[in-house]
Amino acid sequence: MVLFQHFGLESSPIFKHFDISDLNYPIHLHRAFEILYVRKGQVQEQVDNRIYHVNPHQFIIVFPDQLHGFDMSPNTTATIILFSPEIVSAFSEQYKDHIADNPVIFDNVPPEFEHLVDCKINPNAVRAKKISFL
């Protein structure tokens, strides 16, 4: 059985983040992009039919509508970031029919997620201001 989540289906674009620990989450999909960042421990994430081991200071990105789920090793902590495709509309349009060959991204310096806030974004402001993420 596959779960469908409603992230990314809200009436306005979303940006949410959650700190999690020692959690296993079944195979599911949603319309939002998802980034999982491992702070401590290890996460085994299944994306489509492949298994990835995500270690501390590594990210994994899941594109909209990709089947994915994860198992965290004991004493693991991570942050999940979910955001609507509209937030990165140019990127989303350009890569909507693509998936990453290797979705695990390495990072040597831990990011400071404490400054992030869950928010609703004004879609008109997003369209009016051009921002380059690449």
Image: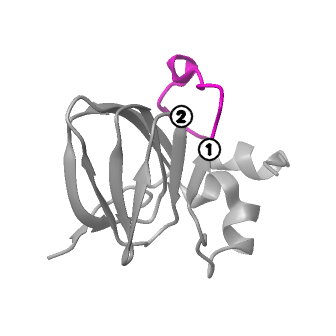
Judge whether residue 1 is colored magenta: no
Q: Is residue 2 left or right of residue 62?
A: left
For marks 2 and 1 on the same chain, the one whose residue lies earlier in the sequence: 2
Residue 21, compared with residue 80, is above or below; it is above
CA distance for labels 2 and 1: 7 Å
**Mark 1, residue position:** 106
SS of the residue at dot 2? loop
Q: For mark 2, does the 10 Å Cα neighbourhood hold few (<14), some (14 to 19), or many (20 or more) residues? A: some
User: Residue 125: percent from the left, percent from the top?
Assistant: 73, 43
Residue 120 locus on image (x, y percent): 51, 38
The residue under the point 68% across, 55% down is 88
- Tell me, for residue 57, which label it has, or none: 2
Q: Residues within 10 Å of mark 1 (few under 14, many from 20)?
A: some
Figure coloring: one colour
Pinpoint residue 67: horizontal percent, then vertical percent.
36, 72
Q: Which residues are magenta?
A: 106-121
Identify which residue is drawn at 33% across, 54% down. 44
Which one is nearer the viewer's eye here, 119 or 42? 42
Which element carries disc 1, helix, strand or loop?
Answer: strand
Image marks 2 and 1: residues in contact by CB distance under 8 Å: yes
